Amino acid sequence: KFELFGAPNNSSNIKRVRNKVGAVVESPSIYKNMSAYDNLKMQCMILGLPKDQRINQVLHDVGLEHMLHDKKRAGNFSLGMRQRLGIAMCLLGEPEFIILDEPMNGLDPAGIVEIRELILKLNRERNITFLISSHILSELSLIATKYGFISNGHIIKEITASQLQEQLKKTTD
């Protein structure tokens, strides 16, 4: 049982509030034989959005504006470019909340920095809240304001970044 934006999962409002959420789980669901633009156009159709309405904007938001007219197939993109395209697909629906599962997994150091900066930028400029699952705690420490620890599918502890720092400080003293 859960609530999303105040709506219980069994309420009739849950479908409406789910539209405020975007997600990239494991790896972005992209059509590898299509360009970035065509992937975004397809996502617009899936979401019932007018074609081309936000494609230029979301490509710019994720640093892929140079891909607007590029016919390069998404299957030939670097992992970092695919992650950014997945986030662009989320942004089409103008979400308030985005779930990212291991967004930095498998990226080279430069790609990790790019994704970290993108998350911070979207949070700062668009006020988007991110829920990030990751085992790279050193990276999370650079962007997280709150941590939740999950065991067997249940949250066992929630703690702010400052509380975590304080506890870590106590254990090293």
Image (cartoon, rainbow, N blue to C red):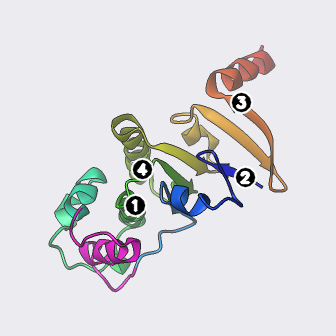
Query: Residue visible at 63% across and 21% down?
Result: 162
Magenta range: 31-53
Left or right of 130? Residue 168 is right
Residue 49 place in picture, x, y as percent: 31, 69
Cα–Cα gap, marks 1 and 3: 29 Å
Amino acid bearing label 2? Phe
Decide which of tag 1 and tag 2 comes sooner along the chain: 2
* Secondary structure category for the residue under label 4: helix
* Secondary structure category for the residue under label 3: strand
127 shown above or below 160: below
* Secondary structure category for the residue under label 2: loop
138 shown above or below 94: above
Cα–Cα gap, marks 4 and 2: 29 Å
Which residue position holds label 4?
115
Which residue position holds label 3?
159
Decide which of tag 4 and tag 2 comes sooner along the chain: 2
Cα–Cα gap, marks 1 and 2: 32 Å
Whether residue 105 is visible to the viewer of this picture, yes or no, is: no
Left or right of 120? Residue 55 is left
* Secondary structure category for the residue under label 1: helix
Name the front one of labels 2 and 3: 2
Amino acid bearing label 4? Ile
Name the front one of labels 1 and 2: 2
Decide which of tag 1 and tag 4 comes sooner along the chain: 1
Query: Residue visible at 63% across and 62% down?
Result: 12
Which residue position holds label 2?
2
Cα–Cα gap, marks 2 and 3: 19 Å
